[in-house]
Amino acid sequence: MKDSQSRLDDILTKLRERNCRITSQRIAIIEAFLNSDKHPSVEMVYEEVRKTFRAISLATVYKTVSLLKELEEILEIGFSSGHNRYDGKKPYPHPHLICSKCNTIIEPDIDLLDQITAEIEKLSGYQILSSQLEFFGVCPSCQKQRK
Amino acid sequence: MKDSQSRLDDILTKLRERNCRITSQRIAIIEAFLNSDKHPSVEMVYEEVRKTFRAISLATVYKTVSLLKELEEILEIGFSSGHNRYDGKKPYPHPHLICSKCNTIIEPDIDLLDQITAEIEKLSGYQILSSQLEFFGVCPSCQKQRK
DNA sequence: ATACATGCAAAACATTTGCATAAGA
DNA sequence: TCTTATGCAAATGTTTTGCATGTAT
């Protein structure tokens, strides 16, 4: 896996190619995604970036998220009821395991998605663009706690 | 797979056990879910039920959806940006293949999810409650059309 | 008779959009 | 300089909630 410095450089290059401007806010938002292993929500990134840019607006974060999704540099982990989360470290489809109590997200060590995707593509005639595989459950730590 | 009449009976029994009332609106909503193979949205069910109950409100449909989810009699197919869809025919986790152009949902013939779930449960120590496996792509029919 | 469900309107929520101002190229 | 980005506020779209009224049991 690429380190976050070279990831950042790649993203900045893509932005330049698109005639997008390299602003300090954008860099801060991108870094927040690249440096977090918490699979942050937009709100979490907003709070993180706000430590440096107190006046930044949520709208700016949303616009950058939408840009990074287009560039395929972050992966959206879709939740049915809002509260989407994002993976900036591995921006390609892979499974997630989400604790229904504490909402922690981890990555189970299973590597079948590519094969399954290829098989479905062949069987169905669909041209598959992306996929989502999410497991919801109770993590060991939350299982110990009553309630 | 159970036919929709016995599914309906089962659901009505569950409702009685919960001291929920059997209203004609509820029956109509449940039947709309059980009889559709289109993986309908709340809006679609609302429009369907409105053919019979012109005054029904969206709120009633939402409340019934929430009830049916609790009873595990419909499966929510989560979309990241609202527009959730529901499967009332097979209300247990199974893969879906969604056309990104026409939004048609079909069910690929792949039966690995249970095994993968069991394996992840064992490896992670999580107690897995549910899962979602969704593939997004372009269906053969939409591939033929330009744009 | 007495819960519980319905329908309406308002609220809540995440997300998007429009626009004047600020700032990168 | 000229175009794109920012921040604010308002708008959007979906889902939820509160409450008076209606209805199943």
Image (cartoon, coloured by chain):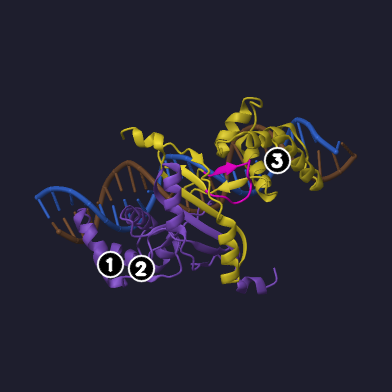
Chain colours: A purple, B yellow, C brown, D blue
Q: Is residue A70 above or below residue B54?
A: below
Q: Which residue is mark 3?
A: B2
Residue at coordinates 60% horizontally, 36% vertically from top-left? B58
Left or right relative to A13: residue B28 = right
The chain carrying label 1 is: A
Point out which mark residue A34 bears: 2
Point out which mark residue B143 bears: none
Q: Amino acid at mark 2?
A: Leu
Q: Earlier in the sequence, mark 2 or mark 1?
A: 1
Q: Is residue A27 above or below residue B60?
A: below
Q: Is residue A86 magenta?
A: no
Mark 1 or mark 3, whichever is nearer to me: 3
Left or right relative to B66: residue B84 = left
Q: Nearer the viewer, residue C17 or A128?
A: A128
Q: Which residue is mark 1?
A: A8
Q: Is disc 1 placed on a helix, strand or loop?
A: helix
Q: Is residue B143 above or below residue A20?
A: above
Residue at coordinates 55% horizontally, 39% vertically from top-left? B41
Determine contact: label 2, label 1, CB under 8 Å.
yes
The chain carrying label 2 is: A
Q: Is disc 3 placed on a helix, strand or loop?
A: loop
Q: CA distance from mark 3 to mark 2?
A: 48 Å
Q: Nearer the viewer, residue A125 or A53?
A: A125
Q: CA distance from mark 1 to mark 3?
A: 53 Å
Q: Is residue A100 visible?
A: no
The C terminus of chain A, quarter of image: bottom right
Residue at coordinates 48% horizontally, 38% vertically from top-left? B104
Packing grade of label 3 (10 A; few <14, some 14-19, many >=20) is few
The residue stretch that appears in magenta: B84-95
Left or right relative to A104: residue A86 = left
Q: Amino acid at mark 3?
A: Lys
